[in-house]
Structures are given as structure tokens and as C-alpha cells.
Image (tube, grey):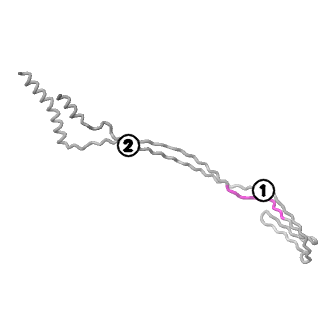
């Protein structure tokens, strides 16, 4: 009986499983690489010719020849017809090509934290508890000696 009461008084009524907290960090990293390239696109030469009947004696000596970058315009009055020639020898387009490459990486970190709460016990309470625990066997031994002499 005394042994059972001693065991129950020292074990207590607390839960043996401490509280747990779970923290999960989920991280996604995205690396984006952008490459810009300059390029020139060339198209085939194009030409346009137009002839219009326009009887106009004032323009008999008309002759225009103009050039702008890759285009050339020729305008002439030939008899009663007005002739226009336009020649674009090369059509060059400057362009920037953009290449994008994405790389994703995912990392997952899991942390398990156990929280154990201990109550604060003053030193003098601990001293009295230990001295009481030590006295139990001495009291039992004294009772055994006293009862065995009778």
C-alpha cells in the first residue's frame, strides 16, 4: 500500500507527450534568363511602275530623280503620258529578338518543434520534497525494527 502511494505521488498526473509545433517552409525560386540579339532582316527588292495619260504641254520637260535610303523614284513626262518608276532595291529591317528561358526550383523545409513547459519550483520546495522522499525508507526501516522486537 505504501509502495503504491509512493509511486503514484512521484509519477503525478501530467501528460507524457509534449506539445508539438510543425513549421513548413515551401520556397519556389524562379530564374529568368533574357537574351537580346540584334538582327537585320532583308526582303527581296520590289519595284512599281505607273503610266498615266495626262496631256499637259507645261510638263513636257518634267524629269525628277530622287533617292531616299534604299528607295529610288524616277518621274518623267514622255509625250502625253506621265511615267513613274519606284524601285526599292533592298528592304532591310533592324529587329531585336528576345529569348526568355525560365528555370524553377522548389525547396521544402520542414521543422518540428516540441514545446516542453516546466513549472517553476522554488529551491526550498525541492529541498523539502527530497528530504521527505529520503525519510520514507528511514521511517519504514524504523517501523520494521520496532515491530520485529516485539
Check residue 94 for magenta coloring: yes
Seen at 86% across and 69% down, the residue is: 75
The residue lying at 19 percent from left, 31 percent from top is 5
The residue at which mark 2 appears reads as 21
In the image, residue 146 sits, relative to residue 84, either above or below, namely above
Is residue 80 on the magenta stretch? Answer: no
Residue at the bottom extreme, as displayed:
58
Q: Residue furthest right?
A: 79
In the picture, residue 112 is in which quadrant?
Answer: top left
Q: Is 144 on the left-hand or right-hand side of 13?
A: left
Dot 1 corresponds to which residue?
43
Q: Quadrant of residue 17?
A: top left
Q: CA distance from mark 1 to mark 2?
A: 68 Å
State whether residue 51 is above or below residue 20: below
In percent of width and height, residue 109 lies at: 45, 42
Foreground mark, 1 or 2, reads 2
Secondary structure under the numbered disc 1 in the rendered image: strand
Residue appearing at x 20%, y 44% in the figure: 122
Range of magenta residues: 86-96
Q: Is residue 149 left or right of residue 9?
A: left
Q: As rendered, which of 134 and 91 lies closer to the eye?
A: 134
Q: Position of residue 142 (x, y in %)?
A: 10, 27
Front position in the image: 103 or 116: 116
Q: Taking 142 as reference, is 78 left or right?
A: right
Q: Earlier in the sequence, mark 1 or mark 2?
A: 2
Q: Quadrant of the C terminus?
A: top left
Question: Disc 2 on helix, strand or loop?
Answer: strand
Residue at image point 61% right, 48% down: 101
The crowding category of the residue bearing disc 2, from other C-alpha atoms within 10 Å (few below 14, some 14 to 19, many at least 20), is few
Quadrant of residue 65 in the image?
bottom right
**Residue 52's spot in the image, x, y percent?**
89, 69
Amino acid at each position: 500500500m505504501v509502495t503504491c502511494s509512493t509511486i503514484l505521488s512521484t509519477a503525478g498526473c501530467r501528460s507524457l507527450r509534449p506539445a508539438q509545433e510543425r513549421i513548413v517552409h515551401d520556397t519556389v525560386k524562379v530564374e529568368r534568363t533574357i537574351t537580346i540579339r540584334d538582327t537585320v532582316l532583308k526582303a527581296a527588292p520590289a519595284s512599281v511602275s505607273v503610266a498615266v495619260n495626262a496631256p499637259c504641254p507645261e510638263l513636257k520637260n518634267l524629269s525628277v530623280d530622287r533617292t531616299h535610303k534604299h528607295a529610288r523614284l524616277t518621274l518623267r513626262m514622255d509625250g502625253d503620258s506621265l511615267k513613274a518608276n519606284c524601285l526599292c532595291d533592298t528592304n532591310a529591317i533592324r529587329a531585336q529578338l528576345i529569348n526568355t528561358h525560365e528555370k524553377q526550383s522548389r525547396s521544402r523545409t520542414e521543422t518540428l518543434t516540441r514545446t516542453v513547459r516546466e513549472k517553476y519550483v522554488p529551491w526550498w520546495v525541492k529541498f523539502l520534497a527530497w528530504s521527505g522522499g529520503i525519510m520514507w525508507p528511514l521511517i519504514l526501516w524504523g517501523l520494521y525494527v520496532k515491530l520485529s522486537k516485539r
